[in-house]
Image: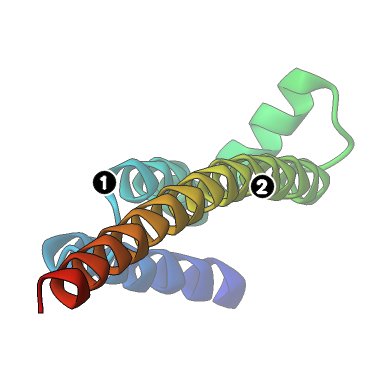
Amino acid sequence: MKLTLVTGLTGLLLLGTIVELLRRRQLREKYGMLWLAVLIIVIPLSLFPRLLDNVAELLGVASGVSLVLFLGIVFLLLVCVHLSWEVSALEEETRTLAEDFALLRAQIDADRAARDELVSTDG
């Protein structure tokens, strides 16, 4: 019973935190919706723990705890894959921006050199 209470309170606390981060625009909506979806599942299961055992039995899993552990690991692996994909895209974008910046800097340096040469020949 105590674990049920702790899980429910933790879910509600996390729900409040996610909503506040979304409100302050410190968390992007796509990630906020992901965590809210997880909480929509976690909070009812914490309030009705027998429901978890029933779902586990329906799926042929030995216990609800095993099902939660398995689903938690799968979820974390999916989050890791998604974040790796995001980091890869950001690395590519950073490389492209650095190349564009280097080209612009080279153009500015060339323009300055041409201007300085023009000023020195006029003077």
Amino acid type indicated by mark 2: Ser
Is residue 9 depicted above or below 90 in this figure?
below
Residue 18 screen position, x and y as percent: 30, 63
Work out whether 119 lies above or below 31.
below
Front tag of 2 and 1: 2
From what the image shows, is residue 26 above or below residue 82?
Answer: below
100 left or right of 85 in image = left
Q: Quadrant of the C terminus?
A: bottom left
Quick one: 109 or 7, which is closer to the camera? Answer: 109
User: Is disc 1 surrounded by few (<14), some (14 to 19) or many (20+) residues within 10 Å?
Assistant: few
Please give the name of the residue rendered at 55% of the width and 44% of the height, measured from the top-left corner: 86
Q: Do the residues under discs 2 and 1 have CB atoms within 8 angstroms?
A: no
Q: Which residue is pictured at 60% across the width and 44% down the height?
A: 50
Per the image, the residue denoted by label 2 is: 84
Q: Amino acid at mark 1?
A: Glu
Mark 2 neighbour class, 10 Å CA radius: few under 14, some 14 to 19, many 20 or more? few
In the rendered image, the residue lying farthest to the right is 62
SS category of the residue bearing label 2: helix
- Residue 58 placement: quadrant: top right
Residue indicated by mark 1? 29
User: In the drawing, does residue 45 fall left or right of residue 55?
Assistant: left
Residue 28: percent from left, percent from top: 29, 52
For mark 1, give the secondary structure: helix
Which quadrant would the N terminus be assigned to in this image? bottom right
How far from the left and from the top, in percent, is residue 26?
25, 67
Front in this rendered view, residue 48 or 36:
36
Alpha carbon separation for disc pair 2 and 1: 19 Å
Badge 2 or badge 1: first in the primary sequence? 1
Q: Depth check: give the residue in front, 21 or 113.
A: 113
How many numbered marks are there?
2
The residue at the point 58 percent across, 51 percent down is 91
